[in-house]
Image (tube, grey):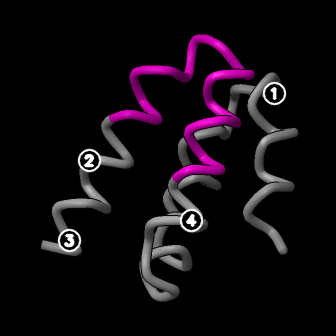
Amino acid sequence: MARAMFEYTKTVLKKVSFNSELFCLELKKAVKRLLPHEINELKIWLNEFVHGKPELNGCLLLIKN
């Protein structure tokens, strides 16, 4: 079940990546509902995903804490 939430989170983040505000909001939600090891996985995925998308780089600060 937990893995499904991680995959769902990635899907949602991909879909809202056109808008940095929505992306940040969904990222905040993800940090609240994912397990600690999934958050670490999400950090890795995000670093690759936002590469070349400078408008989303600011949102990474939400997960660096």
Kindly indicate whether the residue at mark 1 contacts the one at mark 2 (C-beta within 8 angstroms): no
Rendered residue at 81%/27% (across/down): 54
Residue 44 is inside the magenta segment: no
Q: Nearer the viewer, residue 53 or 43?
A: 43
Q: Residues within 10 Å of mark 3 (few under 14, many from 20)?
A: few
Q: Give the image location of residue 26, x and y in percent.
A: 56, 38
Range shown magenta: 12-29
**Please, what is the dominant secondary structure of the magenta stretch?**
helix
- Tell me which corner region of the image, top left, top right, bottom left or bottom right, holds residue 3: bottom left
**Earlier residue among tags 2 and 3:** 3
SS class, disc 4 = helix
Q: Identify the residue position indicated by label 4 in the image.
A: 32
**Earlier residue among tags 1 and 4:** 4
Residue type (three-letter) at the residue carrying disc 1: Pro
Q: Identify the residue position indicated by label 2 in the image.
A: 8
**Earlier residue among tags 4 and 2:** 2
State the separation of the CA atoms marked 1 and 4. 24 Å
Kindly indicate whether the residue at mark 3 contacts the one at mark 2 (C-beta within 8 angstroms): no
Residue most toward the bottom? 37
SS class, disc 3 = helix
Find residue 3 and name its label.
3
Rendered residue at 45%/66% (across/down): 33
Question: Which numbered mark, 2 or 1, is in the foreground of this view?
Answer: 2
**Earlier residue among tags 4 and 3:** 3
State the separation of the CA atoms marked 1 and 3. 28 Å
